[in-house]
Image (tube, grey):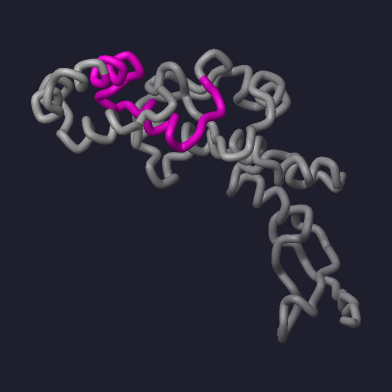
Amino acid sequence: MAIPVRAELAEGFCNKCGTDSLFDVRRSGPRSGSIVRPCRTCKIELNKARYKIHPYAYDANSLARQRISSRWYKAWAAMKQRCLNPNRDGSEYWLGKGIKVCSRWLNSPENFLADICKPPTGKSLDRFPNPNGDYSPDNCRWATVQEQGQNRRNTKLSGERVIQIRILARTLPQIEIAPMFGVGPSTICDVVNKKRWANV
């Protein structure tokens, strides 16, 4: 059984708020002279500004901590990052294209949860039916990886076109069908054999 180590407190000066504070010197390692660094309260405020973390992340209430670790909350936070953070990888696909989060969801995870409910297992947030539209209650759903692949901006097929391909495949060679829909013969083969668009 591990023996808990007590904090070793020493007085120091917070270089952010300018007050005298107590610091845990056990965590700071060897030192010389007085301690000059942000106090605990200032560190929390700095982290909020740096990572744009919702205030729930700093709520001592265990229920709130469970909330921020839930899948729906992470989806809400990731949605905001995609649309608001220019330093995020791939931001050109969301922020760069002018995609926004609706005002109802922007600062309210509660509204997001009320409108879209908790995600089923194996599904994540998807903009549907308009993959080029904003994040809003009428343009979002929880979808599987396959469903999201069918809803990408650059997809050349749709449910209606898939049905047409399968009907044509009864009388025409697949190699002749491919140019009609702007896809390769291998894609036609996968559609006909339901390796793709199996849900249609």
**Residue 93, horizontal then vertical, whole percent:** 36, 34
Q: Which residue is drawn at 81% across and 70% down?
A: 23
In the picture, measured across the screen, residue 186 lies left or right of residue 107, that is: left
**Residue 166, horizontal then vertical, whole percent:** 27, 21
Q: Quadrant of the N terminus?
A: bottom right
In the picture, measured across the screen, residue 107 lies left or right of residue 62, that is: left
Whether the magenta-drawn stretch holds residue 158 is answered as yes
* Quadrant in which residue 146 is drawn: top left
The residue range painted magenta reads 140-166
Q: Residue at x 55, y 35 (%)?
A: 124
**Residue 131, horizontal then vertical, whole percent:** 40, 23
* Quadrant in which residue 78 is drawn: top right
Question: For this rendering, which residue is in front, 149 or 34?
Answer: 149
Q: Quadrant of the C terminus?
A: top left
In the picture, measured across the screen, residue 165 lies left or right of residue 118, that is: left
Question: For this rendering, which residue is in front, 30 or 13?
Answer: 30
Residue 41's place in the image compared with 92, above or below, is below
**Residue 102, horizontal then vertical, whole percent:** 55, 19
Q: Residue at x 66, y 37 (%)?
A: 73
